[in-house]
Amino acid sequence: MPKLPAPRRIAAHTVLAVTVAGTVGAIVAWCVALPPFSVTQLYSLVDLMDGVVYGAAAWLILNRQRGGGRLAGWIVAAAAVGSSVAAFAAQWGLLHSGPGWLLSAHSWAWVPGLYALVVVMPWLLPDRPPVWVGRFGVGIGTGYVLLMTVLMVTAPAPRGVVALPAGAQELRTAVVARSASALSYALVVLGALAALGAAWRWRRGPAEQRHGMGWATVGSGLLTLAFLVTVLPPYLPASAPALLMLASQAFFPAAVAVVVLRQQLWGLQLAVRRTLVWYLMTAAVIASYCAAVATLDGLLPSASAVPQLMVTAAIAAGFQPIRQLVQRQVDRLVYGERPEPLIRRMAGSLHSATELGPAVARALRLAEVRISQDGPEPPDGPPGPPMTVPLTSADRTVGYLHAWPPPGELLGAREAETLTGLAPVVATVVDLARTNDELTRSRRRLAEARDEERRALRRDLHDGLGPALSGIGLGLAAARNLVPRDPERARHLLDRLITELNTRAEDVRGLAHGLLPPVLADGGLEPAIELLRQQYARAGLAVTVRTPQPLDLLPGAVATTAYGVTAEAVRNVHRHAGVDRCTVLLERQPQELRVTVTDHGNGIRAGRTGVGLPAMRERADGVGGTLSIGPAEPRGTTVCLSIPLEES
């Protein structure tokens, strides 16, 4: 991350130093003077809270801000410095000592920053206004702030700090006398227009600028209402305007912080999240203290210290529970639910991987969440950069989770932490779903292979053994008819029928051995392959079997699979290769059995279909093996089967 310019860093630390000094000085002066609680002290408390809250915010913005919003940072800095100086001046004046400009600062120091918060700051949210109405509002508001600042600093002593020449002072006095009410109402009107502008962007503006603007609208409206109460006839209690000002100044910084967080403005989302709860708690403690003391002070004797003690004890007792409540509400408002409730909600979606994405999106307030198994590249989704989290189960990547933020927002460290915490659960569900799909497809392919084997057996019986037995039956009937007339011819016919019957019996035995030779029941793969070799030797195919080392006894499933794949491969050579010989190599290694069938015939034709090859793969998958089929050198086909012996 590039460093901020040195002037920005110096300004940030200067603002922090001035606000801290002003705040500490005001508290020390108040402790020395111990003034009675009054409306004036309540306004000083407003200035003190503004100095604390806006001082921290100004330091944060000026010291860490990236991108736009520079004018907003300087407005917050002016509010912080002005409020802390005003608070210090008001309390220091109780001691009746100090220079005149300092004692008068409580009348004018707060004007630039606070007025700019009312009439300029709302136009700058969520960022510098791109339309002419916003620019016009910023210009008019800035002009009004400058005018009021000049009028306040040039006021006659002891309220002002700049002494004008006699003629200029008379002109100022005349202008203020004729337009004092108009200037006060102008602040309210400009503040209302700024609040309406924020409300318009909230309801009608681009989608990417709406998030959090409802809070900014309410905060701006409260500030304007607080100043409206000060210019209206005094129908309310004297402390009401000050309390309303205190409430509005407590709410407005939190509203701005929500806008920054929801739209991740100026690169401050992480730092603002860490301080938002502190802001709210500081404002709540000060506001509660003032309201409670003001109420009890009217009910109990003025010289009694009981109100302050009672309120202090109550705030101390309730601080931690209130802080925890505020922390939960802030986290839920800005980030959505934490993983624990989300996992409980996901319990109803664990049966389907397709339902997990919408469940995560609803709980985390995301635009969309999708789960893909095609690679880390996110699929087409809503506008905005998605966050991709790999899904790993048993050290295998089973998919990727893609999350899109709401329009106009970005996904930060909190969302990344939450999605990473959910990834193992989602990965398990995705892996189970994929395994279930593979099992379903495997069962379907096994059923198809079994049906094909049955059809092949049916063809062999129907097309070979069936007609042969029918012919034998007809021959026996003919021999029976010949016995009375020509016994010699009947004897020769019966001899031929016996030979045919023996041949068909041998075919039946070969067919049975082809399905599962009896020697395989004891793991005897070599004897079974030898019987297969003899069977095809009689059919005209020379099968050379090589075993570099003894195979010994093999597990039944391994022997059966190896024999089935070898028999299918040799059958394909006999039917399709167009050669009269092939080689079978049986190799037993410490951790696997390898079977290789090689011929130098026609090879596998492109586009060839059937269930023989898929059936061999299904057999290999059934025992955790692998099957590869490729060309042989210089021509032909090689079928290689590898079966892990330990797993089997």
Image: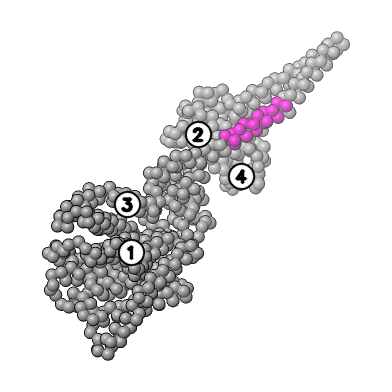
Residue appearing at x 68%, y 21% in the figure: 505
Taking 133 as reference, is 237 above or below it? above
Q: Nearer the viewer, mark 3 or mark 1?
A: 1
Q: Quadrant of the N terminus?
A: bottom left
Closer to the camera in the image, 265 or 633 = 265
Closer to the camera in the image, 337 or 250 = 250
Q: Is residue 47 left or right of residue 546?
A: left
Q: Nearer the viewer, mark 4 or mark 2?
A: 2
**Mark 2 vs mark 1, CA separation in Å:** 90 Å
**Mark 4 vs mark 2, CA separation in Å:** 27 Å
Q: Which residue is mark 4?
A: 636
Residue type pointed to by label 1: Tyr
Which of the two discs, 3 and 4, labels the residue nearer the N terminus? 3
Q: Is residue 617 left or right of residue 251?
A: right
* Residue 416 horizontal/vertical position (percent): 39, 53
Q: Which residue is mark 2?
A: 623
Q: Secondary structure at mark 1?
A: loop
Residue type pointed to by label 4: Gly
Residue appearing at x 46%, y 49% in the figure: 362
Q: Which residue is mark 3?
A: 326
**Mark 3 vs mark 4, CA separation in Å:** 76 Å
Residue count near mark 2 (Cα–Cα under 10 Å), binned few <14, some 14–19, many ≥20: some
Q: Nearer the viewer, mark 2 or mark 3?
A: 3
**Mark 4 vs mark 1, CA separation in Å:** 105 Å
Q: Nearer the viewer, mark 2 or mark 1?
A: 1
Q: Nearer the viewer, mark 4 or mark 1?
A: 1
Q: Which residues are magenta?
A: 443-462
Q: Which residue is mark 1?
A: 235
Residue type pointed to by label 2: Val
* Residue 100 horizontal/vertical position (percent): 17, 78
